[in-house]
Image (cartoon, rainbow, N blue to C red):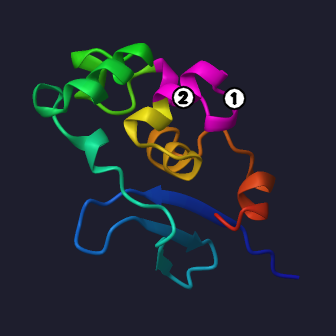
Amino acid sequence: MKFVHNAIALVLSVSNVGLLTQAVDQDDSGPISRELTDVEYPDFRFTNWDTIEDAIKEEAIALGYDIATWDKPGTAQIEMKRFDSLSVELKVNAEAMGFNEKQWDCYQNHYSSYSWNEMRTLKLS
């Protein structure tokens, strides 16, 4: 009996095709890519600290960002949390910046706090 194990690698791309999720089968069938069109890219998040609007900067500071963590995505502690685990106040800050739950979990948390079962249920794997 042949067992096929799937490994999922989330690949964020700021290209003309947008966000890609790449699934790679261990049975050597090759990579399979699909575009996720339901998660809008939050351009404001991937803009240099010195050029973001003051209103966004204020919300970012409330979320614990500073120039160093904003300009180096993946380094802020807040990014380790999925949206539904944020306090009501932090959710308000994130939403005031322009994030919705899908955007936060995809582009901030990168689904790192999701289990494989949750990812399968949400059809992310």
Nearer-N-terminus badge (1/2): 1
Q: Closest to the observer: 16 or 98?
A: 98
- Above or below, comparing residue 56 to residue 39 in the picture: above
Q: Nearer the viewer, mark 1 or mark 2?
A: 2
Label 1 Cα neighbours within 10 Å, binned few <14 / some 14-19 / many ≥20? few
**Is residue 47 found left or right of 56 in the rendered image?**
left
Can residue 105 be found in the magenta stretch? no
User: Residue 79's x, y, as percent?
Assistant: 49, 29
Which structural element holds mark 2? helix
Looking at the rendered structure, the secondary structure element under dot 1 is helix
Percent coordinates x, y for residue 80 in the rendering? 55, 28
Image point 61% across, 36% down: which residue?
Answer: 83
Q: From the viewer's side, name the closer residue of 86 and 72.
A: 86
Residue labelled with disc 1: 85
Q: Amino acid at mark 2?
A: Val
Q: Which residues are magenta?
A: 77-93
Q: Is residue 111 left or right of residue 65?
A: right
Quadrant (top left, top right, bottom left, bottom right) of the N terminus: bottom right
Q: Is residue 82 magenta?
A: yes
Label 2, on which residue?
Answer: 92
Q: Identify which amino acid the numbered label 1 is placed on.
A: Ser
Name the chief secondary structure element in magenta: helix
Q: Alpha-carbon distance for marks 1 and 2? A: 13 Å
Is residue 25 shown left or right of residue 31? right
Picture layout, residue 30 above or below residue 8: below
